[in-house]
Image (tube, rainbow, N blue to C red):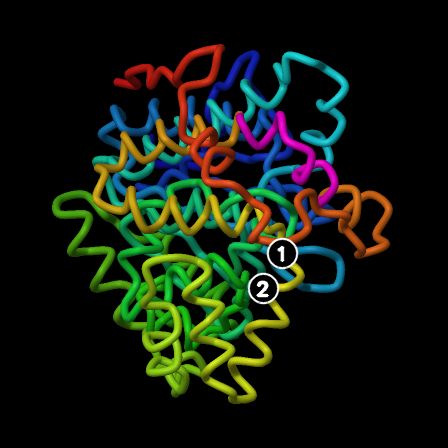
Amino acid sequence: MKNSNLVNLSSTNDEDVLCSKIGSIGHIVLNRPYALNSLTEKMITTMLFVLNVWANDDDVCVVVVEGASSTNNKRPFCSGGDIRMIFEGREDPQRNFAKSFFSQEYRLNNFIQKYPKPYLSLIDGVVMGGGVGISIHGSHRVVTDRVLFSMPETGIGLFPDVGGTYFLPRLPDLTGIYIALTSQRLNLEDCIYLGIGTHYVRSTDYQALVDDLKTSNFQGDAFIKLDNLLEKYLKKAGTAPISKNIENIKRCFGASSLDEIYHNLKLHKTTWSSETLRDLSKKSPTSLKVTFKQLSEFKHLDFEDVMKLEYRMVIKFNFSDDLFEGIRAFIIDKDFSPAWNPKNIKDVEDKLVNEYFQEPDSGDINFRTYS
C-alpha cells in the first residue's frame, strides 16, 4: 500500500492526532496547535495503537512524528501533557484520571524506546515534558533553529518524568541534573551539544525534508537510508550557551545532596550562581528534593524499571498539594505565586521524600505487550 492511506483506527480515531501511511513512512501529526500540541489521553492511546500496527506492517519502514503548525506559522512539536485535565481530576479522591493518563503515557514512552523501526521526530518549536517523552527515546531527532526544549516540572510541583530518570543522568557533565532542577530552557545549539537532537536542519528546509521523506523509498536498511537522506539537509550548529558554564555546573552540581548544591552555589559567588539560586528558589522544595534523589539513586535502572519507578512517583505527586498548587498558580489563575508546602527544602523531611518511591495502594504499572 504505497499511496497515502489513513489508518483505520475504528473507535480510537482522533482528529487531534492524524495518522497516515504515505509511501514507506508512517506519518503522525500532533494536531492541537492551539494548545501547543499538548497530549490528551486519547491522543496517546491512538499513538500506541498505530505504532503497534506499523511495527508489524512491512510497508511502513520509518515512523515520522511532527507537530501541526498554528495560524501564526509557529510549529510547536509538543508542550507536554494536558495538565489542565490533570488539575480537573483532583476532585476524584481516587485520582482515576491520573492513573489512566500516566499509565498510558508511560506505556507509550516505553514502546517508543524499544521501537524496532526508525522513529523520527521533527522538532521545529516547543518541546517540553511529555513532548520530550515521545521524541527523545526514538532513534532520530531533528531539531531546527526554532527549537525550545525544557523539562519544567519542578516549577509546577512535579518531577522530570517520561523517562527523565533514564536520559537526564546520561547527558554529559551533570547537565541533566542541572536542567532537571532549574528547568533550564535550551536552544538549538544546546540540544545538539548535549545530544538531545541528533540532527540540525534549518527551519527553512523543514518542509522540503518532509516532502522528501514522503516520496523516498526506505525499503531495505531503513536506518541507513534515513541517515543518508538526513545528511542532505544537515547543518552545523554553533557554540552552545550551556557549554560556557560546564565547569560551573560540574563544580556546583557534582554534590551528594541538594543542600550541598545550594552550599556550592552560595560559595561560587558569580552571576551564573546567583541566577541559578534565584531559579531554584521558585521551584517546589518537595519537587527539588524528590528529583535529586530520583536522578542520583536510580539512574542505573533499565528503561522499563525507570518507567515503573516514575509511575509510583507520579501517582504520589497526584495525591500531594504542590502539584495542584503549581498548576493553579501557573496555568489556571496565572498569579505566578505558588504557596509551596513545605516552603523550604530544609523542611522537606527524608521520610516524606522516600514515600514518593513506594508502590501505590493501587499497584504498580503493568506494561502490556504490544506485538
Disc 1 marks a residue whose amino acid type is Lys
The magenta segment: 316-326
Which residue is tagged 2?
280
Q: Are marks 2 and 1 in contact (CB under 8 Å)?
A: yes
Q: Is residue 317 magenta?
A: yes
Across and down, in percent, residue 327 comes to: 73, 42
Residue 348 placed where, x, y %? 56, 44
Residue lying at the far left in this picture: please name it.
221
What is the CA distance from the residue labelled 2 to the residue labelled 1? 5 Å
Residue where numbered disc 1 is placed: 283
Q: Main secondary structure of the magenta part?
A: helix
- Mark 2 element type: helix
| Rendered location of residue 106, percent (x, y) | 42, 30
- On screen, residue 186 versus residue 280, left or right, reads left
Q: Quadrant of the N terminus?
A: top left
Q: Residues within 10 Å of mark 1 (few under 14, many from 20)?
A: many
The residue that appears at 69% across and 64% down in the rendered structure is 73
Tally the numbered discs. Answer: 2
Q: Nearer the viewer, residue 249 or 101?
A: 249
Q: Position of residue 183 (x, y in %)?
A: 54, 61
Disc number for residue 97: none
Q: Quadrant of the C terminus?
A: top left
Residue 118 relative to residue 209: left or right: left
For image coordinates 32% across by 68% down, the residue present is 254
